[in-house]
Image: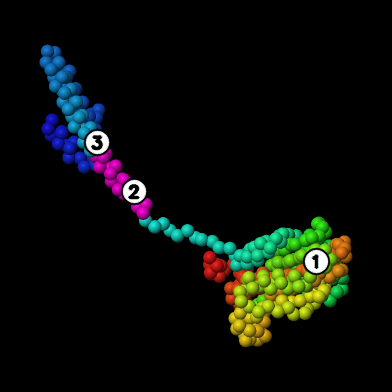
Amino acid sequence: MEELESKINSCTNLDELELIRVEIFGKKGVLSKEFAKLKDIPAKEKKDFAKSLNDKKVALNEVFEKHKNKLEKIALEAKLESEKIDVSLYGYEANKGALHPVKDMMDRIIDYFVALNFSVESGPLVENDFNNFEALNLPKNHPAREMQDTFFFGDGRMLRTHTSPVQIRTMLDSKPPIRMIAPGAVFRRDYDLTHTPMFHQIEGLVVGEKGEVSFANLKAILTDFLHHMFGDVDVRFRPSFFPFTEPSAEVDISCMFCKGKGCKVCSHTGWLEVLGSGVVDPNVFKAVGYEDVSGYAFGLGIERFAMLLHGVPDLRSLFDGDIRLLEQFR
Ligand code: PHE
């Protein structure tokens, strides 16, 4: 009896204990063998023998259950220890994304004009000849079309070469006064350091009653806008030509890289061209059926702004999708 007890208590894990259980309590175990002797015991001794054997069994079972509980507790503690998590440890840093610099610049420009009560309009990338050229006073065979060579579909439609067709769409859809911008992708047959076949523009158009909207208004808003974007730069309006505006002006800022002294970025002129603008040509209003109105319009390249403000030397790198460039804009 004592021998069996110490056998149970010497088990150090549950597997060992299970073997002992079979050895003692199993069908062919020590106790079964003892009980088997009953049949050879004389009848009057049977009762006492059975009772003492049963007491033995109960006592052994108690010892067994006690030790089993102890071993189970040890096993559970070992398991908990091995699965312990230190919740105060730092985790892995989540991979933070960022807006693409072109999208970010677009948002910044939109924010400026929305704050001045401009609506944000949009139009399709595939345009018809009327909206992209004809209504903008760019008749067939006009030499200015050459500068805006694009991808044609053969049925008269094309990938829009500028956001100006959204001016036409908006005027055809609504009555003056109009105060809108139109951001979006445009397409031209160009590919070099400063040109990609797809790039983004923001168009602006303001239309009011005749005499209400003037070149002076255009000058004021664009000067403020450029100071807002580029800080303390000089702004100059240089006479230019666009078929859909008259008079027209290209707008330059003093080169922020050389402070106007002349460098590679500004081709040693001290000035950077950043905008096209002008007073809306009467032929454009005629094309959309507007009478007795006046207005101004402007257009700018968003990538150009991003390149200048972030010092990106090659426009094409903005579209390479190279994570090393994009990571710098987090
Ligand atoms: N659409 C012109 C371009 O793409 C820019 C522009 C817009 C100029 C509006 C004047 C007025 O170059």
Magenta span: chief secondary structure: helix
Q: Amino acid at mark 3?
A: Asn
Q: Please report whichever mark, 1 or 3, sits nearer to the chain's N-terminal start.
A: 3
Q: Position of residue 304 (x, y in %)?
A: 66, 73
Report the front residue among 150 and 297: 297
Mark 2 against mark 1, which lies toward the viewer?
1
The residue that label 1 is drawn on is 212
The residue that label 2 is drawn on is 83
Whole-Å distance between the Cαs marked 2 and 3?
A: 21 Å
Residue 87: within the magenta? yes
Report the front residue among 302 and 63: 302
Characterize the local packing of mark 2: few (<14), some (14-19) or many (20 or more) Cα atoms within 10 angstroms.
few
The residue that label 3 is drawn on is 69
Residue lying at the far front of the rendered structure? 212
For mark 3, give the secondary structure.
helix
Q: Residue at x 18, y 36 (%)?
A: 8
Mark 1 against mark 3, which lies toward the viewer?
1
Q: Amino acid at mark 1?
A: Glu
Q: Position of residue 119 (x, y in %)?
A: 72, 59
Q: Please report whichever mark, 2 or 1, sits nearer to the chain's N-terminal start.
A: 2
Using the rendered view, name the quadrant where residue 69 is placed.
top left
